[in-house]
Image (spheres, rainbow, N blue to C red):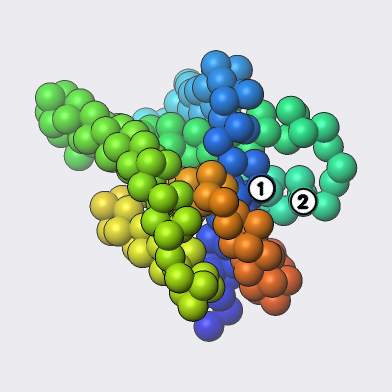
């Protein structure tokens, strides 16, 4: 039960982070966030691969480069940091997770001796799914949110959140990616403050469980 609720807590943290920062965080960070995300994932990967024996180093390298956007989002909520810096950190951390997913895919493909054409198609598919999901969510979700009845104001964001998380997790994405996408998309709705209030109430109850579970797993 603890692991289940810790996962629930993690998804909520990322969702709230997306709601609070919105698309403006991505627009304001722009190319700088992309460069930071690529550097933060690729450099640790290359250093690890050059030091440790192959092929194990490929998996280790992809793991080393991963950014805990969950922990970062939680700290940003508690610390009074300049908004532009907070937006940059949030955007680059979210992009970093996507890049790490691609690195893990490449590493597993290399270990399994998959053909280059097959690897390329897999990576291209993940990128395409991510981009299409982001754009579609940004266009469709705010419009639906603005039109739903007040009777479903609590159910709609949660169903959307965990629905998209379930779908993309089955495909192979980390839950933080769809959670952030839904948060950013719903931040464009006229009801974003209502959605944030609902999510913050749940976060007050379950928010700490992610860190509690991490503590329990330490030996």
Identify the residue at the far right of this view. 80
Q: Is residue 132 visible?
A: yes
Which numbered dot is residue 205?
Answer: none
- Tell me the CA gap for discs 1 and 2: 10 Å
Q: Residue at x 33, y 42 (%)?
A: 136
Left/right placement of residue 174 relative to residue 199 reads left
Provide the secondary structure element on which disc 2 rests.
helix
Q: Residue at x 55, y 16 (%)?
A: 31
Kindly identify which residue carries mark 1: 20
Q: Are marks 1 and 2 in contact (CB under 8 Å)?
A: yes
Give x and y (percent) for residue 30.
56, 20
**Relative to 155, does residue 189 appear above or below in the rendering?**
above
Tell me which numbered mark, 1 or 2, is placed earlier along the sequence: 1
Name the one closer to the observer, 95 or 82: 82
| Residue 106 in which image quadrant | top left
Name the one closer to the observer, 148 or 3: 148
Kindly identify which residue carries mark 2: 77
Q: Residues within 10 Å of mark 2 (few under 14, many from 20)?
A: some
**Relative to 121, does residue 153 appear above or below in the rendering?**
below
| Residue 27 in which image quadrant | top right
Give x and y (percent) for residue 2.
58, 79
Q: Residue at x 22, y 35 (%)?
A: 125
Q: In the image, which is nearer the foreground, mark 1 or mark 2?
A: 1
Provide the secondary structure element on which disc 1 rests.
helix
């Amino acid at each position: 039960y603890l692991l289940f609720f810790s996962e629930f807590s993690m998804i909520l943290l990322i969702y709230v982070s997306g709601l609070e920062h919105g698309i403006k965080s991505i627009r304001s960070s722009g190319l700088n966030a992309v460069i930071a995300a690529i550097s933060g994932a690729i450099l640790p990967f290359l250093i690890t691969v050059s030091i440790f024996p192959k092929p194990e180093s490929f998996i280790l390298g992809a793991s080393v480069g991963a950014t805990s956007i969950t922990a970062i989002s939680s700290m940003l909520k508690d610390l009074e940091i300049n908004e532009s810096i907070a937006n940059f950190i949030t955007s680059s951390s979210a992009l970093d997770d996507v890049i790490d997913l691609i690195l893990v895919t490449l590493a597993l493909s290399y270990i399994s001796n998959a053909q280059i054409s097959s690897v390329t198609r897999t990576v291209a598919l993940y990128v395409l799914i991510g981009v299409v999901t982001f754009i579609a969510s940004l266009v469709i979700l705010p419009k639906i949110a603005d039109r739903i009845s007040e009777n479903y104001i609590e159910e709609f964001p949660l169903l959307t959140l965990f629905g998209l998380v379930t779908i993309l997790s089955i495909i192979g994405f980390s839950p933080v990616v769809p959670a952030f996408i839904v948060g950013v998309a719903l931040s464009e709705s006229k009801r974003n403050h209502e959605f944030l209030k609902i999510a913050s109430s749940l976060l007050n109850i379950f928010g700490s469980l992610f860190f509690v579970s991490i503590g329990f797993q330490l030996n």
